[in-house]
Amino acid sequence: ALPEAVTIYEVGPRDGLQNEKAVVPVEVKAEMVTRLLDAGLPIIEATSFVHPKWVPQLADAAELMGLLIDRIGDAARRMPVLVPNEKGLDRALDLGLEHIAVFGSATETFATKNLNRSYDEQFAMFEPTFARAKAAGMTVRGYLSMCFGDPWEGGVEIDAVVRAGVRLLDLGADELSLGDTIGVATAGHVQAMVAAFADAGVGPERLAMHFHDTYGQALANTLAAMQVGITTFDASAGGLGGCPYAKSATGNLATEDLLWMLKGLGVGTGVDLDKVVETSVFMADALGKTPASAVARALAGQ
Ligand code: HMG
Ligand code: MG
């Protein structure tokens, strides 16, 4: 049976824009975020407090959050931001933000490339970040990358993913988002992953799925995940996105593609499809391209 409703966790302003060659003006980012909010998206990850040299596209994180707080107040403070370490946490605390997302890797190679830390060192970096965020009353999402395959290491054992995920949960993660960073997952693999977490005592209500559509499998994977109880899905308006430190990571599952499928299935989201499409077209224009999302192209006649 499918769930009656699911939560869409919008990552376009963060996962989408971090990978665009063009640096988008902060005003345009603020417009994107407020349009997505107006479309009814319940959670919008707005930006990243990472090192600006590592992700120059999001170097304006503090400026963007300041603008949003001026315009929409607490709704902006409720938007999660990506934070890798205590320095990032301090930047989020300075602005009074309430939710952060810490991002780890299931593999050694990607921990090095994305965080400049070994696999074990990443958890050492996260530990005080979690402890201080929790003490400040924040919620902390844990992302785990390369859960279904790694461009350098190849296949990734399900048991290794469960071990890494449990470490993030033990540090205090309120939710664990399993990233198919390079989009190689297939439906059976997704269901086996959910079953392995359940065997380790982690039920589907504590998991979210973060699919990239590189191999065109993201919707099939979403349906397979819903069949085994997952009810939170990350998606990016227009299918923007990828990861600058992962070879071959293309766009995320597009929010409007996900909405089209969910609408057809009668699964509720509270999100206005037409407004998401309008936002995707607005952003595609700002970036000088056509949307990667098939649904946006179909509905907007592009
Ligand atoms: P590092 O060079 O090892 O940093 O980078 P460090 O701890 O040695 O510090 C060096 C300098 O950086 C210091 O400044 C720090 O203050 C500063 P100095 O004393 O030399 O003047 N610094 C910072 N400045 C601003 N904000 C910070 C920060 N931290 C340190 N937060 C670091 C380590 C983690 C910082 C770096 O590797 C980094 O920023 N990585 C981010 C990479 C990234 O953002 N990747 C994309 C997001 S992950 C993703 O997309 C996957 C996901 O979507 C799921 C999926 O699809 O799989 C989530
Ligand atoms: Mg991603």
Image (tube, rainbow, N blue to C red):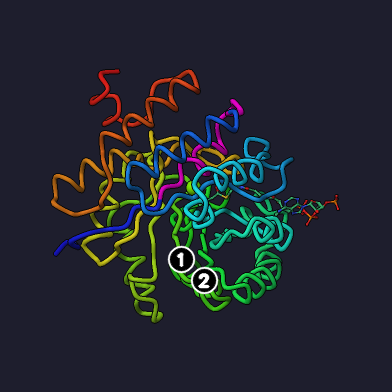
The residue wearing badge 2 is 173
Instruction: Please provide percent x and percent y for residue 31.
Output: 48, 33
**Secondary structure beneath label 2:** loop
Mark 1: C-beta under 8 Å from nearest atom of ligand 1: no
Q: Which residues are magenta?
A: 10-24
At 46% from the left edge and 64% from the top edge, which residue is drawn? Answer: 157
Return the mark for residue 176.
1
Q: Residues within 10 Å of mark 1 (few under 14, many from 20)?
A: many
98 with respect to 8 (left or right): right
> Does residue 11 belong to the magenta stretch?
yes
Whether residue 106 is visible, yes or no, is no
Q: Residue 23 appears in which quarter of the rendering?
A: top right
**Secondary structure beneath label 1:** strand
Whether 47 is drawn above or below 87: the answer is: above
Q: Residue 54 appears in which quarter of the rendering?
A: top right
68 with respect to 283 (left or right): right
Instruction: Please provide percent x and percent y for residue 42.
Output: 37, 53
Give the residue type at disc 2. Answer: Ala
Give the residue type at disc 1. Answer: Leu
Instruction: Please provide percent x and percent y for residue 238.
Output: 38, 33
At 35% from the left edge and 48% from the top edge, which residue is drawn? Answer: 41
Q: Look at the image and tell me in which quarter the N terminus lies.
A: bottom left
Instruction: Please provide percent x and percent y for residue 63.
Output: 65, 41
At 50% from the left edge and 23% from the top edge, which residue is drawn? Answer: 287
**CA–CA distance in space, label 2 to label 1:** 7 Å
Q: Nearer the viewer, residue 179 or 4?
A: 4
Q: Look at the image and tell me in which quarter the C terminus lies.
A: top left
Q: How many marks?
A: 2
> Does residue 21 belong to the magenta stretch?
yes
Whether residue 6 is visible, yes or no, is yes
Q: Nearer the viewer, residue 145 or 265?
A: 265
Whether 246 is drawn above or below 287: the answer is: below
